Image (spheres, helix red, strand yellow):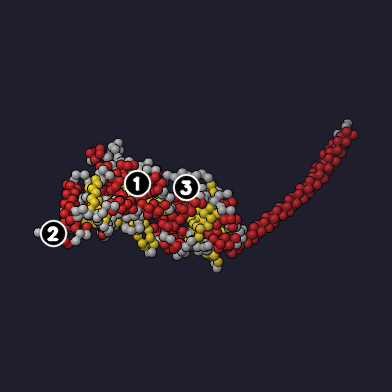
Amino acid sequence: MRSSHHETAADAEGEPAIEYILHLYITGATPNSTRAVRNIKALCEQHLRGRYELLIIDIYQQPALAKREQIIAAPTLVKKQPLPVRRLIGDLSETKRVMEALGLPDLPLNNSHE
Amino acid sequence: MQDFNATSHPSLPQLPKAPTGIDGLDEITEGGLPRGRPTLVCGSAGCGKTLMGVEFLVRGILEYDEPGVLMAFEETAEELTANVTSLGFDLTGLQAAGKLRIDHVHIDRSEIEETGEYDLEGLFIRLGYAIDSIGAKRVVLDTIESLFSGFPNQAVLRSEIRRLFRWLKDKGVTTVITAERGDGSLTRQGLEEYVSDCVILLDNRVIDQITTRRLRIVKYRGSTHGTNEYPYLITQEGISVLPVTSLLLNHEVSNELVSTGVPALDDMFGLKGFYKGSSILVTGTAGTAKTTLAAGFANEVCEKGGRCLFFAFEESPQQLVRNMNSVGIRLAPWIENGQLQIEASRPTLNGLEKHLVSIHKQVSEHKPDAVVIDPISNLITVGNISEVRSMLTRLIDFLKVNNITAMFTSLLSARNERQEMTEEGVSSLVDTWISVRDLEGVGERNRGISILKARGMAHSNQVREFIVTNHGIQLLDVVIGPTGIVTGASRLTQQLQEQAQARAARLELERKDRELARKRLVLEATIANLRTEFESVEEELRQISHEEQSRLRSGNGKHQPADAAEGEHTSASADQ
């Protein structure tokens, strides 16, 4: 199952400068999911502009994907690239932890620091 | 009181149950697990929790046509499939047939980062998808507690698990949830809080280095159930729970008879043998030819064209064959043609349950008409008496249900014969009880055989002496002396005495005969003598009367001679 996603990553690598491949699995329009979408979009635009690919998947629509991707909690953000693969569960409201998990340097952290 | 009676009226609908198809479990639960509700199966490592879950699904599919979903948190589908292949469960085939879905839930704590509020909707979606895709009626969650290691937020987890069970109930699927046993509680994470309909506890206990697995139903809401701890086995066919007390005594019985292998012993039974399918116990002290009797029986079964399975716990097959040859019981040909199979093992090799399993297995493979276990008393070395008793009960029931004649031998120690019999308590289970024992007399021991009981037929009440000859066992005729039955040398003495007495009596009789003959001779001589005398008198009288007549004829006119004749007559009578 994982190999098929490497392929998607390879396809993505055709375009230059894509470092981050992020998949966000959400459950419809639940409050957690809505917040998560808003949070990740804001974060990516702020720190990863032009360097990321974000795919948002509603597992209500694609339940088979939930099994394939080993989704248990919702929402779950899967960082496919760069390795190692990390899973971020929750509505991504704790920005500091999200940044750490995504392996983003301290610099953006300073930016967000008031 | 009346209200109570009304509510417990049998016409009311009973709690619907989903039969598990697992040997014996449905009997204990009186029909199966609560249908449409979750059941918690908890136990320590190596109890067979996963196996029970898998078997519940597989039997559900094969026997009750209820598709199932297995959500495995610990093992992958491949691992599970491989693990249960040895039990004949073809998970791959069932999956291909659309009857089974296996979803392996992989949790890696190191990959997971909590970044805010979340729920476990992903799990629900996966489960819901799996259930709906095949119309599953049964669900197994194999160790859902693994979630606790993956998700640090216990509050969320607990509320989600509670929601999951509620959701499963609403979906109407019969669910089995396995959980690891915790210290002081049924499960490590207190899952029993959430699953309140039925809780089954599996236990793996080591006593005296021997492992026994036991199952107990802790609770079953809305239903009665067996409350004991029931030993269970993991056999080649899956889990087998062996309830001792709930087995109904309603097996078919046979009127066919089986010979004991000793013709004279047959005669001691009213119907000349044992009933087929009955169980026979042969008890006796050391060296009382129990094994010989058992081997003789096995030989007889084979001679009649039957098949026999012989479990020897004391001797190797070769030794047994050699020893039995010396008493004229030839077992080798039967082994060669496959009618007789000897399974020899030390009792300590396995635990009791394992012995039971291996006996079950051998019996189902060999399909014997008779089973011999020599001796059952050796099993006590691997378990305490009550365990042995419960094992034997189950064994005897198993053999009876299959209409297999069973002969057990049991060694009694000479000191406390009676006590041991009752302790082992097998005697009440068996149909026929033969006792062999030493009859110790003046300076010698002899063997005696008697029938203590024989259900369903009249039997001899005698203690018969028997000898082991090189043509097998032979029962000797009963010799009764002044103080009861005599045996051995006393028997010979008694026989000699009896012979002497008989001889004396015969001589006396002959003497009396001769006496009589003599008397008869005397009588006859006397009779002859008298007759001779009588004849001479008769002749004389005839002579006189003749003379008288001739005189009357010659002197018809004269009266004178008449007087003279009268005078003569008088003198003649005086003469006599």
Q: Nearer the viewer, residue B95 or B439?
A: B95
Query: In the rendered image, is residue B302 in sight?
Result: yes
Query: Who's the residue at 37% across and 54% down the image?
Result: B79
For the residue marked with disc 1, what is the amino acid? Arg
Residue B101's label in the rendered image is: 1
Of labels 3 and 1, the one closer to you: 1
Locate the N terminus of chain B by quadrant. top left
Query: Who's the residue at 41% across and 55% down the image?
Result: B391
**C-alpha distance separating marks 3 and 1:** 37 Å
Q: Is residue B269 left or right of residue B218?
A: right
Of labels 2 and 3, the one closer to you: 2
Q: Is residue B201 left or right of residue A29?
A: right
Of labels 1 and 2, the one closer to you: 2
Crowdedness near tag 2: few (<14), some (14–19) or many (≥20) residues, C-alpha within 10 Å: few
Chain on which label 1 sits: B
**Helix, strand or loop at mark 2:** helix
For the residue marked with disc 2, what is the amino acid? Asn
For the residue marked with disc 3, what is the amino acid? Asn
**C-alpha distance separating marks 2 and 3:** 82 Å
Asked which quadrant contains residue B543, the reply is top right
Crowdedness near tag 3: few (<14), some (14–19) or many (≥20) residues, C-alpha within 10 Å: some
Check if mark 2 and mark 3 are on a common chain: no
Estimate the x, y position of residue A23 in percent, counting from the top left.
Answer: 25, 51
Check if mark 1 and mark 2 are on a common chain: no
**Helix, strand or loop at mark 1:** strand
Estimate the x, y position of residue B457 in percent, counting from the top left.
Answer: 50, 47
Q: Which residue is mark 3?
A: B402
Check if mark 3 and mark 1 are on a common chain: yes
Residue A111's label in the rendered image is: 2
Contact check, label 2 and label 3, Cβ < 8 Å: no
Above or below, B398 relative to B412: above
Query: In the rendered image, is residue B464 in sight?
Result: no
